[in-house]
Image: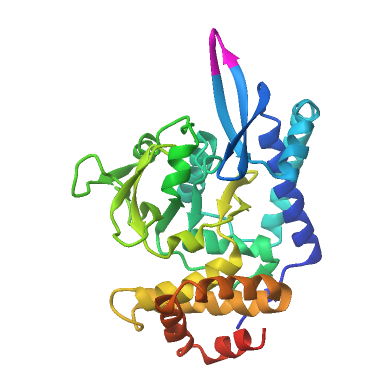
């Protein structure tokens, strides 16, 4: 596999840029922090007043890292101008190091969605758009073939989380997409729009959600869209991580964990309509093989845990993974040695 490491400078620069973007988000705190408990977890909200009305804005699950950043919100707000200059400088350094940057259409879409709160409210970038961002997360440089874009931009979220958050995007994704010259593709029911097609190109934006049996279209209230349910997606988007898309000074997004992405690609490669020789199935296997190679060296425990989780979910899961590994003997050997 044509995998080479990014320079130490690039790896450190990426992590610094990611940290600054997370601090930038924390600096936007307007009021006091409110805790809400659901199913044994604690979620944090920014509670503030607008006129005579109290508002709550979802901030994220209560991790020690998020709490620490929010505790410094006032200081972070005061340092906004210098931080923004540094973010621009770091983004320039990463482009000079050769990290992939999204095209203008994709970058402007990610930026608009981030500003609207789509990623803050549980939206996760999936597919090849997410795969490209593992360069920074894993500190590797992919070949140009591995980073070939399909033209599709996919986002996913859990229906239950979207219903439970009690918050909503600040601008509807449908309005953003239409302003960027994407037209809605109607579903079976007129109100269930979950995909948009670019009217001056071939790009497609789709919203997805986890299914557990029937793969129907479901509402995602927090994101203001409907989404196509897909089996196995619950595994992919559990415990997502922050990442930076290198558009302008960077855009803070959310992507699946790389070890889950790799194992999920083995599953969907076998599930594609058209069989294992379909072009998308071949691409799925290629992405899985490359990530397994990198993760087996740098994060073997994470990779083993992700594989064990998937194979513990039933015979159908194991059959799909095994079918893909039959076509990837080197990848199978790597996984067997974990």
Q: Closest to the observer: 66 or 105?
A: 66
Instruction: Locate the C terminus by quadrant.
Output: bottom right
Residue 212 x, y percent position in the rendering: 37, 60
Extent of the magenta region: 49-54
Above or below: residue 121 compared with residue 308? above
Q: Closest to the observer: 115 or 117?
A: 117
Residue lying at 56% horizontally and 67% vertically, measured from the top left: 260
Let me know if residue 52 is in the magenta part. Answer: yes
Residue 277 x, y percent position in the rendering: 35, 84
Above or below: residue 197 compared with residue 223? below
Total marks in image: 0
Q: Quadrant of residue 283?
A: bottom left
Let me know if residue 130 is in the magenta part. Answer: no
Above or below: residue 30 compared with residue 226? above
Can residue 143 be spotted in the picture? Answer: no
Above or below: residue 144 compared with residue 162? below
Lateral position of residue 60 relative to residue 301, left or right:
left
Lateral position of residue 57 relative to residue 197, left or right:
right
Can residue 140 be spotted in the picture? Answer: yes
Residue lying at 34% horizontally and 73% vertically, measured from the top left: 272
Principal secondary structure, stretch drawn in magenta: strand
Farthest-out residue, front: 40
Residue 161 x, y percent position in the rendering: 48, 44
Q: Quadrant of residue 299?
A: bottom right
Residue 216 x, y percent position in the rendering: 28, 54
Lateral position of residue 172 relative to residue 333, left or right:
left
């Amino acid at each position: 596999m044509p995998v080479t490491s990014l320079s130490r400078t690039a790896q450190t620069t990426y992590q610094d840029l990611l940290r600054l973007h997370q601090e930038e988000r924390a600096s936007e705190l307007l009021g006091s922090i409110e805790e809400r408990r659901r199913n044994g977890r604690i979620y944090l909200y920014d509670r503030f007043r607008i006129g005579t009305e109290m508002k709550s804005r979802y901030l994220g699950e209560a991790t020690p890292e998020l709490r620490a950043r929010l505790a410094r919100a006032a200081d972070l707000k005061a340092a906004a101008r210098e931080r923004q200059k540094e973010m621009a400088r770091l983004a320039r350094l990463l482009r000079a190091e050769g990290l992939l940057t999204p095209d203008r259409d994709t970058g402007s879409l990610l930026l608009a969605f981030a500003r609207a709160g789509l990623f803050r409210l549980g939206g996760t970038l999936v597919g090849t758009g997410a795969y490209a961002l593992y360069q920074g997360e894993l500190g590797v440089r992919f070949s140009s073939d591995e980073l070939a874009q399909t033209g599709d931009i996919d986002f996913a979220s859990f229906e239950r989380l979207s219903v439970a958050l009690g918050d909503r995007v600040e601008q509807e994704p449908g309005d953003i997409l239409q302003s960027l010259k994407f037209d809605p593709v109607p579903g079976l029911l007129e109100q269930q729009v979950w995909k948009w097609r670019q009217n001056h190109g071939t790009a497609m934006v789709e919203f997805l959600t986890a299914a557990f049996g029937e793969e129907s279209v479901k509402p995602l209230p927090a994101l203001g869209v409907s989404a196509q349910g897909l089996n196995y997606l619950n595994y992919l988007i559990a415990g997502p991580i922050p990442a930076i898309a290198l558009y302008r000074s960077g855009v803070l997004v959310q992507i699946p964990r790389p070890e889950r992405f790799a194992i999920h690609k083995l599953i969907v490669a076998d599930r594609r309509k058209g069989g294992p020789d379909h072009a998308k199935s071949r691409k799925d296997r290629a992405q899985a093989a490359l990530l397994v190679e990198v993760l087996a060296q740098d994060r073997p425990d994470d990779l083993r845990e992700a594989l064990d989780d998937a194979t513990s979910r039933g015979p159908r899961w194991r059959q799909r993974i095994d079918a893909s590994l039959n076509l990837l003997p080197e990848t199978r050997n790597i996984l067997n040695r974990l």
